[in-house]
Image (tube, rainbow, N blue to C red):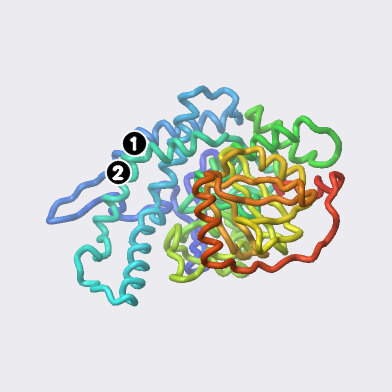
Amino acid sequence: MRDEARTQIHVFDKTTGKSFTSSILDAGSENDFNTITEDGGRLNFEGMYDAVDDAGAAIVAQIAERRSLSWMGEQQVLALADLGTVQMLRTKLARETPGVLVEEMRDLLDKLGADLHDPHLAPPTDADAKRGTIEAFVKRTSHRNSFLRLMPGLVEPAGSARFLISDHPVVFTNPFPYGDHGLQAQGILVHLPLSPTLLLTWHCPTIVARLDRLLCTEGKEHATLRAYGRRLISGEPAAISDEEVERHNVVQVTQSRRFLFSHAADFSCVRDPLTTEPRSGQRDALVHLGRMGEGPPPRRRMPDGWNMVVHGPRDHCLLHLEEIDPDGEGITARTCDLALLDAAARDPRLDYVELYDGPRQRRHLGQVKLETLATRGPGWFRAVHFDDSLRALDRHISETSGKKSIEKRPNAETCTESSAGRRTSSLG
């Protein structure tokens, strides 16, 4: 990532907290990174990236020159998806992740008394990791298709702040408090800096749909999001504030392995999150195994109280629960989010629902539907299995094994149609 005619780039090392200058060609490079040395032979597989790199460089140059995506056809969109895929898979962080997971699994099996000398439990060698990189590249179609389901858009700074890039440049954010970080996650945003003044962002279809709906409204509320939506649909860059640019840079810091790269020598925006965010130091893997017997990690951005997250095949939402019936079938509860409840209940088969008490997930039900319970009053519903025969089996098991009680919330208010719009899913 560099400005015109620059041959040098500034590098920040998270492990030492120091910065230095490097040539652009050498920045982030490592001797024999793409060479397998085994049994006296050497295989350099750097050349397998040439076609993708050439196509990626060509399309990035055109985007930078035109500062627009509106000119792109099907082949250009495919090349852009391939660029994102390869930039995500070829990094050292991606390569080292399987080995870290194997070591974590070995530690777990060791505690269970397994024989770690079993060759089937041996950790991968450096050559194994490099062969894994080759395999991931050859079999990258599924990742590329995941990129293709997302809508690409451009973002540019409105002020003087500039984008950083890291040794793991493809990063993920999710504006929803219950959202995951993965290409197939609902609500996902995938970011790749193209230059100090241009950021490429792929948008989840559910976000694009929300922006489309906002464009049909008027008024001062959500004016910034409407402006963003118009630029996204037009293919032109959306201008963002210096504060928003710095937020993007913090994501590069926290999701990088070790090195950050910048056109300028000022890395103050890097040092701040390293001080305040304990997870911002050197990163050894993209994911880690959870601890045996523990539930999912808490979601710190979830609102207080009881909430149900609903994931359907095409959309998702969060229902705030005013009351839960511990004796009801499945998850029986009452919400004041009547409009969202009505929309979710129209889907005959949802992927899953999750019940949260603040940041903690308490229950997870898959392959469900929501049934409204009009006889119990406004906002009452139950989440049950969509298949009636399996639902009957679940009822039988519940009746014979007994139910676990769930705390009831106070009856906070009476739900009315006028209060149904209080809480809605949004990008914030």
Image position, residue 273 (x, y; %): 61, 64
Q: Tell me if mark 2 has few (under 14), some (14-19) or many (20+) residues whose alpha carbon lies within 10 angstroms of its own.
A: few
Choose between 6 and 102: the one closer to the eye: 102
Q: Can residue 202 be seen from the camera position used here?
A: no
Amino acid type of disc 2? Answer: Glu
Report whether 50 appears left or right of 223. Answer: left
Residue drawn at x 34%, y 77% is: 111
Image height check: is 254 above or below 113?
A: above
Report whether 57 appears left or right of 270. Answer: left
Residue drawn at x 59%, y 66% is: 403
Amino acid type of disc 1? Answer: Asp
- Dot 1: element: helix
- Choose top left, top right, bottom left or bottom right for residue 189: top right
Choose between 95 and 35: the one closer to the eye: 95
Image position, residue 127 (x, y; %): 24, 56
Image height check: is 293 above or below 190?
A: below
Residue drawn at x 49%, y 69% is: 16
- In the rendered image, the residue lying farthest to the left is 40
User: Which residue, given by chain and number where applicable, does mark 1 sit on?
Assistant: 50
User: Which residue, given by chain and number where applicable, does mark 2 sit on?
Assistant: 46
